[in-house]
Image (tube, rainbow, N blue to C red):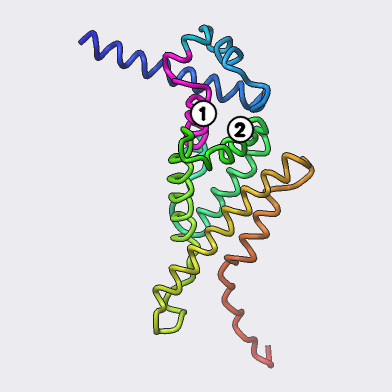
Amino acid sequence: MARRGSYAKGIARREEILETALDVVAQRGYEGTSLKHIAEGVGVSPATLLHYFDTKEDLFTAIVRKRDERDRLQADMTGDREQLRAGFLRVIAHNAQVPGLVELFSRLSVDAVQPRHPAHHYFLERNRVLREQLAAALAPDATSAPASGSNDTAQQDGEDVARLIQAAADGLQLQWMLDPSVDMTALMRRLFDALAPHPAAPPSPARRIDE
C-alpha cells in the first residue's frame, strides 16, 4: 500500500513539474529556460528535477507531450472536415499567444531528427497520428473519383493534402518566429480553403419569369 501511495505521489509531482515548466517555457522561451528556472518555479532543486527526468532533453520532450495533451483537450480535431478545420485553426491561434512553447517545439523537432534523441520517436508518432486525422477528414469523396482505383486515389489524395497542411503549419511557425506580424491563422485558413474547400452551396431554385 505504501508503494502504491508513493507511486501516486510521484506521478502527481511529475505532473506538477510539467505544468509549471509549461508556464516557464511559455514566458522565457527555449534558450531562456534552464533546469534552475523550472526548479525555482516548482520550489525544488535542479537535482530533484533529474530524479523525475534523466536529462534536460527528456524534460523538454515531456513538456512538448504535455503541451500537445492540452491542445487536444482545447481543440477537438476528431470528426468531420469542418470540426477538424476549426480545431486545427484554434490550435494555430493559441500558438501565437505562447511564443516560448512554439520555439521549444520548433527547436526540439529539429533536434529530434537524430534517431537517438529522446524526442525522435515521439515526433514520428505525433506526426503520423496528425496526418491520419487530417487525411481522414480531408480526403475527397471516393464516390466522386473514377471507378478504377477510386478508393486508392482518394486515400492518396488525403494523405498528400495532410502532409502539405502539416508542412505549411510547421513552416509558418518558423516564419512567425522571425516576423511576428505573420498571421499564421489567416494563412492556414486560406490554405485549407485552397486544398480542401468547403462544399459548394446548392444552387438557388430558378425563379419564374412571371414572378
| CB-based contact (under 8 Å), mark 2 and mark 1 | yes
Question: How busy is the neighbourhood of tag 1: few (under 14 within 10 Å), some, or many (20 plus)?
Answer: many
x%, y% of residue 35? 57, 16
Residue at (45, 72) in percent of width and height: 154
Q: Which residues are magenta?
A: 49-69
Is 4 situated left or right of 135 in this image? left
Residue at (59, 83) in percent of width and height: 205
N-terminal of the pair, mark 2 or mark 1, is 1
Look at the picture and state if 210 lies above or below 49: below
Q: Distance of mark 2 from mark 1, alpha carbons?
A: 9 Å
Callout 1 secondary element: helix
Is most of the magenta stretch helix, strand or loop? helix
Q: Is residue 52 part of the magenta span, yes or no?
A: yes
Q: Name the quadrant of the N terminus.
A: top left
Which amino acid type is marked by label 2? Leu
**Which residue matches tag 2?**
104
